[in-house]
Image (spheres, helix red, strand yellow):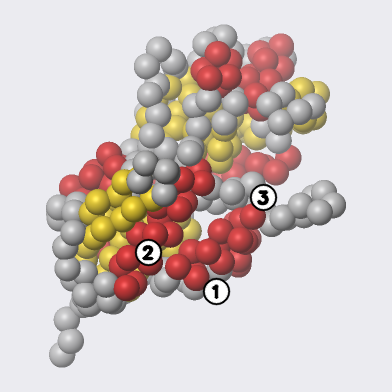
Amino acid sequence: MNSKPALKVFSGNSNRPLAEEICRHIGIPLGEATVTSFPDGESFVKINENVRGHDVYLVQSTCPPSNHHLMELLIMIDACRRASANRITAVLPFYGYARQDRKDQPRVPITAKLVANLLTAAGANRVLTMDLHSQQIQGFFDIPVDHLYASPTLFKYLTQITTKNLVVCSPDVGGMKMAAAYADVLGAGLGLVAKKRTSATNVEAINVVGDVDGCDVLLVDDITETAGTLTAAAKILREHGARSVRAAVSHCILSDLARDRLKGGLIDELIITNSIPNDPKGLPITVISIASLLGEAILRINNNESVTGLFKVKGF
C-alpha cells in the first residue's frame, strides 16, 4: 500500500511570519529556501532541500509590492516542478489582482484570469486561497481551487464583544451576501450603506438602508486599502445615530492614506486577519490569525480529506 507523500511547506518573502505560524500548527519546520533578488531586481529562488516526490505547499500573499511577490511565487513553483515535486499547491492567503475580474471599461484586461493562467503555466497543481473578491474567480482556474473563508475565525472574536442592538452593515451593494451571513450567525439586524465612488481613493456615502439609531454597527468587507469606503460608511452611520461602529475585513492593505483615515476616530475598531503583514501600532486595529485555518486545510489536502468542515460555524 502506498503511503501519502511527505508534506513540506515553503515561504516567499511576502508573509513569512504567517508561514512560520502555519508550520507550528502543522507540527513541521518551515522548509529551507533561498528567495532573494539580484542587484538588477530579478528574483532568484533555490529550494535548499529535497522535494522529489513530496507534497509541496508554497505560502505567498501577492500583497505590495504585488508584482514582485507574484513573480517570486511563480519562480518558486517552477523550481519545485523542475525538482520533481509530486504535487505543488500555491497557498495565497491574499489573491492579488482579484478586483480586476471583468471588463467594466473598454480595452481593459481581466488580470485575475491572467494571474490564474500564470500560476497554472508555472506548474501549480492546485490553489488554496481565502476570501476572493468575487467567488467566480475560482472558475478562472483549470486546476482545483480550495476557497476558504475568514468568517469562522472572525466569528470567534466577534461573539466575545458585548454589543447593544447589533446591526451588520455592508458598505456597498456587492457585500450584502457576506453581511447577511454575518447577521445570521450573530443574530443581528441587517443594513446597507449606499455609496458612490468619486475616484480610486475617495468614496461618498449617499444613504443608509435600515435602522441604526442607538445601535452598535458592524461593517463587513473582504478588502480595504485606503479605508475610504469604511470611513465614509462609518461617517454616515454615525450621522444616523449609530452608537458605535466596528469593521471586520479579511484583507487589509494599510496604506498611508488608510492610516490617516483610521486615526480620525470614525471607526472604533478595525478587525482584520494576518493574510497580509501589517503594523497596526497606534491604530484601533485587532489582528486575528488565520494560521490554524490554513494549517488545517493543508493537512486535510495532504490527507486527501474534505475541507468542507472548515466552513462550519455553530453547526451550520
Question: How crowded is the residue under tag 1: few (<14 C-alpha within 10 Å), some, or many (20+)?
Answer: few
Instruction: Determine the image quadrant of residue 137.
Output: bottom right
The Cα–Cα distance between marks 3 and 1, rounded to whole angstroms, is 19 Å
Q: In the image, what residue occupies the spot 67% across and 31% down?
A: 171
Q: Position of residue 215 (x, y in %)?
A: 60, 19
Residue placed under numbered mark 2 in the picture: 77
Whether the residues at callouts 2 and 1 have beta carbons within 8 Å, the answer is: no
Secondary structure category for the residue under label 3: loop
Q: In the image, what residue occupies the spot 63% across and 15% down?
A: 242
Whether the residues at callouts 3 and 1 have beta carbons within 8 Å, the answer is: no
The Cα–Cα distance between marks 2 and 1, rounded to whole angstroms, is 16 Å
With respect to residue 273, does 130 lie above or below?
below
Residue placed under numbered mark 3 in the picture: 100
Secondary structure category for the residue under label 1: loop
Which of 141/78 is in front?
Answer: 78
Q: Which dot marks residue 142?
A: 1
Which of 177/200 is in front?
Answer: 200
The tag earlier along the polypeptide, 2 or 3, is 2
* Residue 181 shows in the view: yes
Instruction: Determine the image quadrant of residue 91.
Output: bottom left
Which of 183/308 is in front?
Answer: 308
Amino acid beneath label 2:
Ile
